[in-house]
Amino acid sequence: MTSGEADGPPEKQPGRLPKVLFPESASPEIAAPSRPPAEPRILFGSPQAPTLKGDTPRVLAAGEVRRRIPCSVAALLEIDANAAASLASMALRIVDGTNLDDHHFDDVVRFGASLQTQHGRLAESELALVDSEVLARGKRLSAELLQRLGDLDPDRVFAVRGGVLRAIKALAAPRDPAGLFSQLYPEVQALAKELDALAPEIVIIAKELRAVGKGYATLDRNLAAHILAGRFLVHYVSGLQLSDHERQAHYTSQAEAIETRTVSLAATKATIEVSTRTVAAVARHVDALGHAAEGLLQEELPAWHAAYSAALTAARTAQSPAQAGAGAPLRGIHARILGKLKSEGWPMTTFKLHKPEEEVRRVGFVLQKQGIHERIPAQVGLNIDVSGSMSDLFKSGAVQAALERILPVALYFDDDGRIDTWVFSNQEKMASLAPATAKNYEGYVEREIISNNKLKTVLWGGTDYGPVIRSNLMTYGLMEEEAAGGLLGMIFGMSRDTFGEETRSGVPAINYFLTDGENADRDAAWTLLQKAEHAESQIYYVMVGVGDERFDFLRSAAEQFPNVGFVSVKDLGEFVGSDDAYEKLLPAELCTWLKHEHDDEDDDHH
């Protein structure tokens, strides 16, 4: 309004009636209060008071009756006496929540499946963190910084003549140490600044990796509870004797399905145990990388610059840094900086045997998939290459992990539960060791091989296969000892008893052959494999070639002989830590050979 007067109610216009939204005829009548019902309405059946949870049958949809499975913490601890009471309580809840009366097998098919889905998500998170651009950049900066510091190594830059070693170093020493330092020190500073700026992001990644590790630990516990519950359910059903044959068959089918799921969960749990250790080690390395630049710019590098300048001054006055008193401080600071930046390397995935009985069940499950439903007795052996190129695999623990992965195979097949173990290098350098068993496998490689003084002349040589194959054939009674010229009677002046050598004939043998190199005795080894093929009681070789070699001899042998298989392994640690390690260690050809040997033995008995 432009007049400035206050707004008021609108003027009534003459002849216009107000709008009526609801006429009187449309107004609702006031309803009389209804009388409350005397009894509650019951849609189906008769009203009943709620009953407490008990072991009485419960009526499910379509009239199916679910019978509660009698279970207790004490009963679960009888299945696994080593389980904690809290774990048994978790397993009890899982048993109580499992319905074996469901004809659709829903509970059984999904038994623990959500845990495996969680495992997949955690593994994806771990992979994304480890492969992150931030981490890759941090590792690159650290490597470049180490390279620059290596170029400025005081022992090389200030090499002095005197003695053969110093003379060699002097030849590689730069002609102008001061010029080199002036050129590279700014690069060292720039790399240190960049790494320092990236440090907060790297530390966050380390924290996220530790969170993944906690997720793995929780998942591992849940899997352990499901495995215990699954074992109890299988045990419970095996003891049922029902007059209703149809229901008995139904329960048996449910139990078989649960057993399959339990084995699958055990495999997942084994992988998680490895992942937990691996992610913890990676988190430590990442955290160290994130803190590598701490104090570097403000403390170490300035001190290093001052010490280097003093050494350069000493060099200009024709004095050695040691004579000028600058050598020791400079080397000390240089070593301290290198120590902060150097990493022990990213830990590899590998395998650690914690519960042999669970791994034996996994072996049985793999064999069932290959059509072996009954245990076939067999001996298990392991030939380990101890040539010089294998030394890193021994130091890293990969060989010990391989032995621990093979031991459950021996526990399954061998009546004595042992791995007959040999080591070999070149020429006649080989030895038969004390068998590996469930009682002595921990630390076996370090104790029986690396630190065994009796093997000093055997370790870290070349590679010949023939002598150890000959020893295998003699041990299993497939070859007369005289044919080897009494080789096993005296190995480097040591009696056979020194290495626990004995004859074990009459039972098929599976021998795992672990090597990383081609052999120099092709003709001799080939002749021995021909004898092994035609032996009355056979031996099957699983040749495991580790690394980048072509392994032409092993590949040709696998193609030629029906009792020789070949497995190519790029990284031994990753191989033994993989989910499908048993499938590769027990290939289809080996299983077919075992069944053939078993059938022939049965025919002989008839």
Image (tube, rainbow, N blue to C red):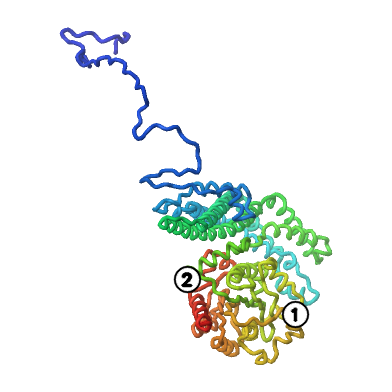
Disc 2 crowd rating (10 Å Cα; few below 14, some 14-19, many 20+) is some
Q: Nearer the viewer, residue 588 or 57?
A: 57
Q: Which mark is residue 22?
A: none
Q: How many marks?
A: 2
Q: Please state which of residues 601 and 571 is positioned toward the viewer in this rendering.
A: 601
Kind of residue at badge 2: Gln
Residue 370 circle label = 2
Q: Eyeballing the image, is 81 above or below 7?
A: below
Q: Quadrant of residue 231?
A: bottom right
User: How many neighbours does mark 1 have within 10 angstroms: few (below 14), some (14-19), or many (20 or more)?
Assistant: some
Q: Nearer the viewer, residue 493 or 595?
A: 595
Q: Quadrant of residue 354?
A: bottom right
Q: Earlier in the sequence, mark 2 or mark 1?
A: 2
Is 272 placed left or right of 249 in the picture? right
List x then y, in percent, for residue 217.
59, 51
Residue at 50% x, 37% y is 52
The three-letter code of the residue at mark 1 reads Thr
Which mark is drawn over residue 498? 1
User: Residue reaching furthest left?
Assistant: 15
Residue 267, percent from left and from top: 54, 61
Q: Is residue 164 left or right of residue 196?
A: right
User: Could you tell me if residue 134 is visible in this image?
Assistant: no
Q: Is residue 299 visible?
A: yes
- Asked which secondary structure carries label 2, the reply is loop
Element assignment for label 1: helix
When the figure is inspected, residue 32 is found, relative to residue 159, above or below; the finding is above
Image quadrant holding the N terminus, namely top left
Whether the residues at callouts 2 and 1 have beta carbons within 8 Å, the answer is: no
* Residue 26 drawn at (x, y percent): 21, 16
Residue 101 picture location, percent across and down: 43, 51
> Where is 466 relative to 178, above or below?
below
**Distance between the alpha carbons at the discs numbered 2 and 1:** 39 Å
